[in-house]
Structures are given as C-alpha cells and as structure tokens.
C-alpha cells in the first residue's frame, strides 16, 4: 500500500507554455533575460517518494529534462491530456527501456490514450518497429487510483472544450491547461495545502487562465502556498512578476523543488 505519510518531493521539470521560453526568434525582455528563472521548458513535473519517480506529462523537452536532473529511473508517465507540448517526448522513454530492461507504464484518460496512439502509431501497431518504446497502457477515469507509492485523485478541468485531468495527491494538487473548473471539481481540490495552477499571461486567453483568473481561483481555494506554471513570455520577467504576487503565491520556475 502507498505510504502517504512519507514526504513527497515535487520537481518542476518545465514551467513554460507550448512555445517554451525563450521563444524562437523573439527578442523581448523576457526571452533575452539573463535570469535562468525566465528560461522555461515545456510544462512537466516529477513526483518522488522514496525511490519511486512519477512524471506528469512528457513534452518535447523530456529528454533534456531527464538528463538535466540526472534521472536514472521512472516508474510511470501520467498524462493530463494529449496536446503535443505534453506528449511529444514519448519516444524518448525507450532509453529507460534499453538501460533498465523494462517497460514503462503510462496512464491517462481513454480519450488521451487514444490520441497518443494516433500520434505515435509505430509504437502501438502489431509487428511494431523494433526500436519503438515499450509501454504498458493504463486507462484511468475520474476515480482515485494508485501508482506505486502514490495515490491520485483526478480533477477534471476544461481547456476550452477539451477535458483535461489535473491531479490531487494528498495535500498537493497540480492543474495545468485550464480555463474553467466546475464547482464540483473545485471541491475536490479544497483543503490542499499546496496548489499548482496555470497562468499563461496577463490578458485573457481562450483556453488558459490568465494571471488574474488564476489568482481568483486560488483566493477561493485558499491553500497555504501556491505556484503558477505553464507560463508564456507575455507574463513578464520572473523577478518583476514575483514581486507583485501575494506573499503565498509564487511563480514556479524550471528546477524548483518543493516537499509536501
């Protein structure tokens, strides 16, 4: 059974939006900043408890993120949804197959897993390519489920018209790519001591919370501490934005580690 009394470490592998930061060919003050906290890979986190590592989303920077943090093993990849900035690194899981001689478990809603199969057909077709990743597929629903030392409660949020899963693990809730959360789903989040939520930019966006919208949600939920992620260069420089936030809300940045 999972030991939920053991502290969980959360590593922010990436905190940027789909373009990453800096954006290719952009010369704005954020993209040219010398502050490493303004340099953002595509959004992903890693949960660690004991010797177990679970990665939530593996975007196009997955390989670099694994190398940067010297990750030697992962137990599973858990998807929020199937947009490319959250799944495009799936092929690089095969390195763990080669080195560790094991298949890797992947989890997501049936809709998400079906989309993953469509985008990576060579992994899943019969008589698959010899060098393709070896994966064990696990569909999940809105019901609580466990992966090794971790117990997850899915939180359904809306990404414009797409249903996306956030996840609550004990006192920690992680939500990305949301622009609406129903009252019933917000109730699942209440009581979380630490909440991570997306805040794309200052102005409104069709499928992501803006900074003011994210803060409004957080004011309602009232966690002890909150972190903002899935950030674009339009939000502004880390140092300037962080200074304007309430004392219990922070901009997440790549490489940040917290314990819950």
Image (cartoon, rainbow, N blue to C red):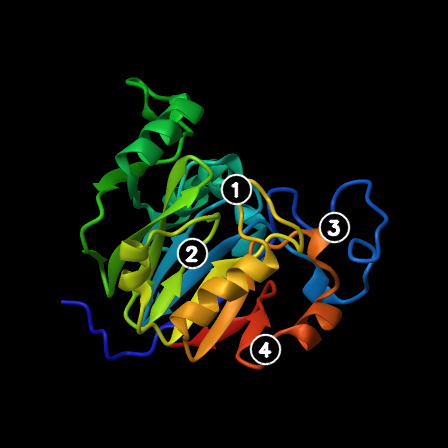
The residue singled out by tag 3 in the image is: 22
The residue singled out by tag 1 in the image is: 207
Q: Earlier in the sequence, mark 2 or mark 1?
A: 2
Q: Earlier in the sequence, mark 1 or mark 3?
A: 3
**Mark 3 crowd level (few <14, some 14–19, many ≥20, 10 Å Cα):** many
| Lateral position of residue 45 relative to residue 252, left or right | left
**Mark 2 crowd level (few <14, some 14–19, many ≥20, 10 Å Cα):** many
| Lateral position of residue 250 relative to residue 58, left or right | right
Q: Earlier in the sequence, mark 3 or mark 4?
A: 3
Tell me the distance, in whole angstroms, between the alpha carbons under discs 2 and 1. 13 Å
Q: Nearer the viewer, mark 1 or mark 3?
A: 1
Nearest to the observer: residue 108 or residue 162? 162
Task: State the count of labels.
Answer: 4
The residue singled out by tag 2 in the image is: 175
Tell me the distance, in whole angstroms, between the alpha carbons under discs 1 and 3. 21 Å
The residue singled out by tag 4 in the image is: 246
Can I make out residue 167 in this image? yes
């Amino acid at each position: 059974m999972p030991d939920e009394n053991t502290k969980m470490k959360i590593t922010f592998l990436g905190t940027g939006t789909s373009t990453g930061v800096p954006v290719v060919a952009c010369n704005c003050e954020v993209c040219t900043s010398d502050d490493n906290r303004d340099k953002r890979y595509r959004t992903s986190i890693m949960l660690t408890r004991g010797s177990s590592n679970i990665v939530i989303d593996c975007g196009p920077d997955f390989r670099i993120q694994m190398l940067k943090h010297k990750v030697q093993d992962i137990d599973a990849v858990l998807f929020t949804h199937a947009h490319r900035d959250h799944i495009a690194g799936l092929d690089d899981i095969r390195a763990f197959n080669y080195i560790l001689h094991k298949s890797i478990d992947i989890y997501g809603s049936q809709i998400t897993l079906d989309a993953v199969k469509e985008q990576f057909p060579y992994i899943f077709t019969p008589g698959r390519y010899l060098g393709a990743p070896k994966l064990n597929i696990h569909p999940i629903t809105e019901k609580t489920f466990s992966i090794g030392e971790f117990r997850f409660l899915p939180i359904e949020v809306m990404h414009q018209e797409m249903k996306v899963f956030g996840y609550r693990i004990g006192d920690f809730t992680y939500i990305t790519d949301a622009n609406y959360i129903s009252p019933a789903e917000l109730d699942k989040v209440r009581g979380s001591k630490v909440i991570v939520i997306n805040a794309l930019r200052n102005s409104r966006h069709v499928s992501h919370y803006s900074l003011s919208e994210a803060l409004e949600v957080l004011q309602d939920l009232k966690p002890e501490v909150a972190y903002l992620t899935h950030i674009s260069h339009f939000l502004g420089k880390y140092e300037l934005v962080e200074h304007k936030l309430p004392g219990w809300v922070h901009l997440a940045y790549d490489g940040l580690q917290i314990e819950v």
